[in-house]
Image: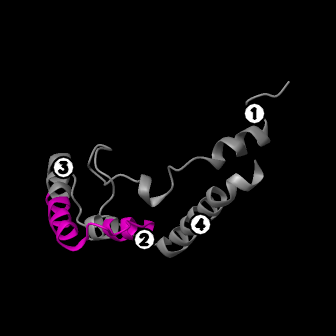
Amino acid sequence: MVTANCPVILSMANRYDTSQNPEAQFQPDSNNQVLFNILGIIDPQEMENIELNLLDQLTTVVIENVTENQTITLSNLCEWHRRWLGNVATNLSRDSYQKQRVMNNTLSSLSRERKFAHLSN
C-alpha cells in the first residue's frame, strides 16, 4: 500500500505545482487578487481597466492590419498577447522563443499527421 508520505507520490504531486512560477505570483498587498505586475497595481478593478484599455487598443491595431485572407498563426497570437500585456506582466518575453518554437513544432507535426492520416487507413 502506498501512503501519502511516499517520496515518489510527493515528487509526482510537486511536479505539477506551479505556485513558484512567476505567472502564478500575486502582487504584494493585493490580497491574492492581482497577479504580480511591473506597474505595482494592487487593485483588481484598476488592473481590469488597464487590461481592457490595452485590449481595446490592440483590437484596433489588429483590425486595421489583418487582411481578410490572412492566416492567423501561433506567432501572430503570441505577438498580440505580448503587445497586449507586455508592458504590464512580468514574464511574457522570458522563454517565449523556446515556448513558441515548441508550439510551432507541435502544430507542424499535427498538420503533417492530418495530411497523411488517409494513408494509414
Can the viewer see residue 88?
no
* Disc marking residue 38: none
- Vertical comparison of 51 with 92: above or below: above
Q: Find the distance from the CA under tag 4 to the CA under tag 3.
A: 41 Å
Q: Name the mark nearer the viewer: 1 or 2.
A: 2
Query: Which quadrant would residue 93 be assigned to in this image?
Result: bottom left
The residue under label 4 is which amino acid type?
A: Ser
CA neighbours of label 1 inside 10 A, class few (<14), some (14 to 19), many (20+) = few
Q: Is 78 or 1 nearer to us in this picture?
A: 78
Q: Which residue is mark 1?
A: 5
* Disc marking residue 43: 3
Residue stretch rendered in magenta on the structure:
53-80
Say which label, 2 or 3, has the lower sequence index. 3
Q: Find the distance from the CA under tag 1 to the CA under tag 3.
A: 40 Å
- The coloring applied to the image is one colour
Say which label, 1 or 3, has the lower sequence index. 1
Residue 33 at what x, y percent from top left? 29, 44
CA neighbours of label 4 inside 10 A, class few (<14), some (14 to 19), many (20+) = few
- In the picture, measured across the screen, residue 26 lies left or right of residue 103, that is left
| 74 falls in the magenta region | yes
Say which label, 1 or 2, has the lower sequence index. 1
For numbered disc 3, what is the local secondary structure? Answer: loop
